[in-house]
Amino acid sequence: MAKCVPAAIQVLLVGVAIPLLAARPVWAQPLATTVGPSPGLAPRHAAGTTSMPAAILSAPVPATPAPIEPAAFAALLRTGTLEELDAACAEVMALEDRPRLRQLQQRLLEVVPWPQSLDVVLANADVLIRCRAPQAALTVLDRYGPGPGPGRVQWLLMQWRAANSALDHRRAALALERLTANQPASLAALALPLQRRPDGTVVTRLALDVLAGHLESRGFHQTAAAMLLAAATPGRPRAERVQQAVALLKALPPEQLEELLETALNEAAAAGAWGLVIDLLQAQAALPGGRGRERLLRLSPRLDDAYGEWRLRRWNPSDPRVKELERQLRAPDPPLDPQEGPPALLPTSRQGSPAATP
């Protein structure tokens, strides 16, 4: 197993990746941007925050921008700078003016003639991606081939971003493989920025999962599954990756699939992810043999999962338990008593973890 990428390189990768998602051109953004503590999750609001200020809640909705005058638009196409064309793209996209958008996209391919510096190439590609022309961004990126160093990291990240936007899974996968030098440990340590929310937080996803998705889209299911199984992150993340790998490896013998599912079950149960445990047991119950079904039957009552238990028992309508479950499922909810206050979020039997693992 390859060693994890050094911490300094991880900081460098994230530091150069975040500005690529900014609303302004990449050269106008600081390279040091803080990423939230958990990939894909925005930071929680501070304790005690109850509501948004009234001024924000009552702020008027921005009006749709007025179309650019024909003469001004023609002048913009002739002499507009990269930053001006970027702003024009945002206005034209807001108006859904596709003819003008295509004109801007074509102009962005020519606005800065070759040869270009790396900073200009990255800025040009960044604007093209925001202007809904990721394939053109790849064309611009092909004008420059940086050597090893921070510049190459930026270039590869922009290549991945452009290819991902263009649904070019081959080039997206190739960019990630080059970025991490084919080291699975590096892929598991690198969080790729996917988008920036209006509040400034960044949605990220681990490169290992992103690359596995690209490989799956190309039909390389075994390679994608092997990559998911190679990740060593314990707990729920590992259980979810094994679950995904099992879905990709349906042709494996049932014994091997059950062994993989057993590994995922142990990880999910240790993390207390009981919803995931149910999903994994259902997958196990679909395999030959009754092990998964029996475990589901034992676990469903403890999780107050009447519907799940009924699905397992419904094939034996003479079973008294089937009739009892059907009665529970058909019974209407009791009317609320205004004197008793709001109902609990979960029934008592579902609060907390089950007493034992399945």
Image: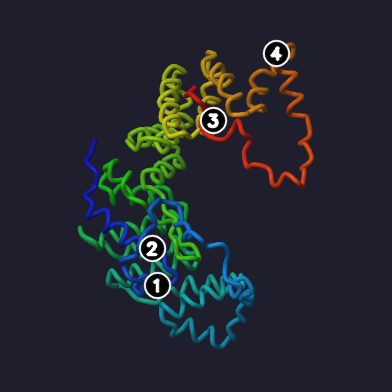
Image spot of residue 222 (x, y percent): 40, 32
Query: Circles 3 and 2: CB distance less than 8 Å?
Result: no
Q: Is residue 316 left or right of residue 98?
A: right
| Residue 229: image tag | none
User: Residue shown at 21%/60% (left/top)?
Assistant: 149
Q: Work out whether mark 4 precedes mark 3 in sequence or the reverse, and give the earlier one.
A: 3
> Is label 1 or label 3 in front?
3
From this view, report whether residue 121 is shown above or below residue 248. below
- Residue type at mark 2 is Thr
- Residue type at mark 4 is Asn
Q: Residues within 10 Å of mark 4 (few under 14, many from 20)?
A: few
All told, the count of numbered labels is: 4
Residue 286 appears anywhere in the view? no
Q: Element type at marker 3?
A: helix
Q: Work out whether mark 1 precedes mark 3 in sequence or the reverse, and give the earlier one.
A: 1
Image spot of residue 357 (x, y percent): 47, 24
| Foreground residue among 180 and 328 | 328
Residue where numbered disc 4 is placed: 316
Q: Element type at marker 1?
A: loop
> Is label 1 or label 2 in front?
1
Residue where numbered disc 1 is placed: 25
Q: Work out whether mark 4 precedes mark 1 in sequence or the reverse, and give the earlier one.
A: 1
Q: CA distance from mark 3 to mark 2?
A: 44 Å
> Is label 4 or label 1 in front?
4
Q: CA distance from mark 1 to mark 3?
A: 44 Å
Q: CA distance from mark 4 to mark 1?
A: 65 Å
Q: Element type at marker 4?
A: loop
Q: CA distance from mark 4 to mark 3?
A: 22 Å
Residue where numbered disc 2 is placed: 139
Image spot of residue 41 (x, y percent): 45, 53
Residue where numbered disc 3 is placed: 279
